Amino acid sequence: MTITINQSRLELRPANQGTVTISFQRTLRIPDDGRAYPLPPGLGEFPLRHVRDYAHRVPAAWAKRGGVLLPMYQREAMWLSFGGSEHALQIGIGKVCAVSGEPWSDHLRADPQNYVVTGTQPWLDGIASGKGTIRQFVAMPLGKGLTVEAQITGKEEHGGIQLQAFAPKPGRIARMERRSRSAAAVAMDDCCALECESSAMGLGAGGTMEQNVYPDPHGIDTWDPSASTRVFVHIVNSEMWHQITGEAPPPSPVSAQSYIDAGLPWFSLYDEGAKTIAPTSKLAGVKSIEQLEQQKLNVKKLPWTGKLVDDGEW
């Protein structure tokens, strides 16, 4: 059971039975205006670093958890891209399942389904909040009550992203062709006004996007509960990234309006009629960051100025 970083992509090998790859894609933050938008493009991968390489610079709790570091600006959006062979993949945000809204579990569940199947699910842009729609993953600092974790659990003590992959039982899965979503060649604007705080980050809910979260086409008995591996992804603010790694953070992303003005494409997935997981009441009831702020939650705005990955105690 190994996890490695390969060119800003995580490679998970549960019990060395095939590999699932996960990349964290920078993207446009879609408007939260009540409309459902098509898929925004990828604007390049977020960099990843091993926590253990900076154990003397990160909080003790992070060093104990192990995993990887990922930098994001406050209010920046992301999506997850999946590749490799088919696996059952659990995705937690602040140890809340992004598919079911249930508390994080180390075990797969069929009802409500608490995982996606890589290959069947080529990407995930947010929480499964509606039938055929998701709410976009948007980075927010912990302690403001604006993350999905805060709304579901009433606390903000974990943050980050949690991933756990389960390999199929031998002989159960035939290899499938992976669908692709092109990256856009867009110049990054390094002088945008973004918000910056030196703190750990979690994921809140942004605008609504057209996207299906697919049911497991193979059935839960396909997956080997003894063949799993997991990783904790710590999201850090750009300031904190520089303090920990000594590296400059990635430039800030372009705005959605600038992208539209340039006439660049958005993407549609032609899967009309495909089955989708029904949203749970927990995730359907999650409010967006904008909705929460309209309830007078204050957010302080500041001007924008190949080794193994360790898994520790969560």
Image (spheres, grey):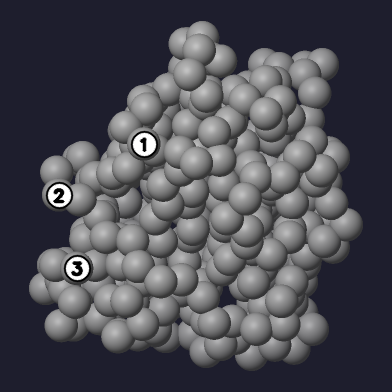
Q: Residue furthest right?
A: 281
SS category of the residue bearing label 3? helix
Q: Is residue 194 visible?
A: no
Q: Give the vertical position of 223 relative to 23 (above or below).
A: above
As measured in the structure, the alpha-carbon distance from the residue carrying label 2 to the one carrying label 1 is 17 Å
Q: Name the amino acid type tagged 1.
A: Ala
Pick whichever of labels 1 and 3 is earlier in the sequence.
1
SS category of the residue bearing label 2? loop
Pick whichever of labels 2 and 1 is earlier in the sequence.
1
Residue nearest the observer in this picture, 147 or 249: 147
Residue 13 placement (x, y as % from top left):
34, 36
Residue nearest the observer in this picture, 194 or 231: 231
| Labelled disc at residue 307 | 2
As measured in the structure, the alpha-carbon distance from the residue carrying label 1 to the one carrying label 3 is 22 Å
As measured in the structure, the alpha-carbon distance from the residue carrying label 2 to the one carrying label 3 is 10 Å
| Labelled disc at residue 15 | 1
Residue 285 placement (x, y as % from top left):
84, 63
Pick whichever of labels 2 and 3 is earlier in the sequence.
3
| Labelled disc at residue 52 | 3
The residue under the point 48% across, 51% down is 163
Residue 70, quarter of picture: bottom left
